[in-house]
Amino acid sequence: MAMKGFSVSLLWLCGLGVLSANAAGGGEPRPHVLWFVVDDMSAQFSCYGESLVETPHVDRLAREGMRFSKAHVTAPVCSTCRSAFITGMYQWSLGLQHHRSGRDQAKIKLPKEVVPVPELFRRAGYYTCNGSGLPRSSGIKPRTKTDYNFEGHRDLYDGPDWSGREEGQPFFMQVQMAGGKLRGGQRESCQRLIKRARETFGNNVDARRVELPDYYPRDPVLIEDWTAYLESVRLTDHHVGQVLKRLEEEGLYERTLILFMTDHGISHARGKQFLTYEGTHIPFVVRGPGITAGVVRDDPIEHIDMGAISLAFAGIKIPTWMQGQNVLSPDYQPRRAVFGGRDRCDETVEFIRSVRSQGYLYIRNYNPSRPHLQPSRYKDGKDILKQLRALHQDGALSPLQEQLLFSRIREGEELYDTRSDPYETRNLAGDPTVVAQLESMRQLLDTHLLKTRDAGFIPEPLLAEIAIDPRWTIHQFVQSEQRYPLKRILSIANQAILRRADQGEAFRLELDDENAVVRYWAAMGLRTLADRFPGALRDAETLAQDPDVSVRLVGGGLMGLLGDRDRAGALFVREARAAQTDAHALWALDGIKFLNQPQMIGTVQRDEVVRGEYSGRAFDFLAGQGLVYRTP
């Protein structure tokens, strides 16, 4: 049954109403709630149209429940995605937008009113658990995963599965599965997975029939990797079947609300970590008592809706602060669009936002001077990325593949017609025939960023200082227009990415503002203009003396762009040595990376400049490239 827009059957509404009444104290057992959360996997399931694999167990959930065709994550990387779905809030509203936020000294705390979903279930009498969903006797090691970026998340669960609950006690279970991570990053691990699938199923995916998106070359290394990925889909489905069998054997299946989703798309060059379809589109299936079987929903939803759906189904009041919505509610009004954000991932500094409507995708790159495939130890360690870089060096990629994957810089704005261009390869942002659509998408995104008080405009070194300050949480800080004049900041940032020389003087005037975030984005605007605006070197010298580290680092970057690389390198090394937080040290070392200066710019000891895991990764990259030499 296809559902265009939103309509529900009377039978389903009645069933949901009865369940909610029972959960609220009508005497009947409350429903259990089980989430399947899979790593690194797009919607390559047969119920979503994938023809090279059969996924009977996920297909069963879709057949017996409701399948959403246009579900997207708000963050295409695991920790920030999990920060969002476990709170039911956009990660950027809480300052959790960076991968592995709140590390080392800069611990991030939630505001008191924001309570994670498992704790809400626990307060309602539920037993909370997180693991494989299988008993210890299964031989499968329990895979507990939280990775929520904020403090206090280790106390959210009572056990690895529901076996430890009291008799008759309802449970809230998260089944964690490695999904696409099963294939690893090397050809050897892919080959082992293919062998494992053959031993499990008696056959393998036919690699000859594997099709890749147009922006990837049909290369043997990439074909083998994608084949192994499809085998990981089959093995994931097999795991789902084992959990469903357990629920049935224990008499729990018919009383359990089951949600199946992944934490983002496939880990690939244009998938995981990015806001294109491959990175954000996920499978999302809901099956449970009272839900009409075989329904297909075509309206767009976000993964942060998981919490609201589950709480409402259990008869637990949805908190007013929660931004996710109960998309099963009879009075739910379908979304016009869904939103996404990409920020720092590991040691790779980035800032991107997007809005996706029924027919268009609009992406805004707030660091357009960065290439799409910035150096990344995590991604560059994978054989598929090594092969892509080798093909790039050999000139063996098509013009489209070169443009999308290896352009030196990106446009500040991207607009794709997703109906005529499903792979999202033709940027229409400069097309005069779609100006009205471009402006509409701009306004949609701006309105949302202001409404949700996006903390992403605060550079991470300053964000770390805010996190350390005991006077407020990041969420509380960004709610204050005085401390964080977001409308003004957004206006400056939006102008900065357009590289318009006539804005140079306006940026320069903002350098005297008392607010460091305002000055930072004015500095970024001047940096994008570089040698196209008179007096840029003088501006760089002014920025290098700013009281805020983030502004000083932009000044160093501007010096480097204007050719004064020695002074820029000295500034970055000085800032790295003075850093108190991992974020400060990382940003300083990141500046060195983009000087593109092959000779030594500093001789430093590792412990002089490393303050945590990601500044350590950045240092190791620079040392490997000969950009910073270690002392003996």
Image (tube, rainbow, N blue to C red):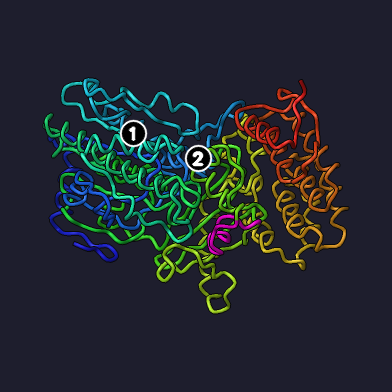
Q: Which residue: 54% across, 58% down?
A: 397
Q: Nearer the viewer, residue 268 or 521?
A: 268
Picture quarter with the N terminus: bottom left
Position of 599 with respect to 419 (left or right) is right
Q: Nearer the viewer, residue 624 or 172?
A: 624
Quadrant of res 587 = top right
Dot placed on the residue nearer the N-terminal end, 2 or 1: 1
Q: Nearer the viewer, mark 2 or mark 1?
A: 2
Position of 183 with respect to 23 (left or right) is right
Q: Report the magenta residues as a range.
A: 395-408
Q: Could you tell me residue 283's position as x and y percent?
A: 32, 50
Task: Work out how far the residue at label 2 is from the one at label 1, CA to CA, in angstroms.
Answer: 23 Å
Q: Amino acid at mark 2?
A: Lys
Label 1: which residue? Answer: 176
Question: Residue 398 magenta-drawn?
Answer: yes
Q: Which mark is residue 382?
A: 2
Quadrant of res 527 = bottom right
Can see residue 123?
A: yes
Q: Nearer the viewer, residue 279 or 458?
A: 279
Determine the residue located farthest toward the bottom in the rendered image: 433
Q: Amino acid at mark 1?
A: Gln
Can see residue 329?
A: no
Q: Could you tell me residue 317's position as x and y percent?
A: 31, 41
Picture quarter with the C terminus: top right
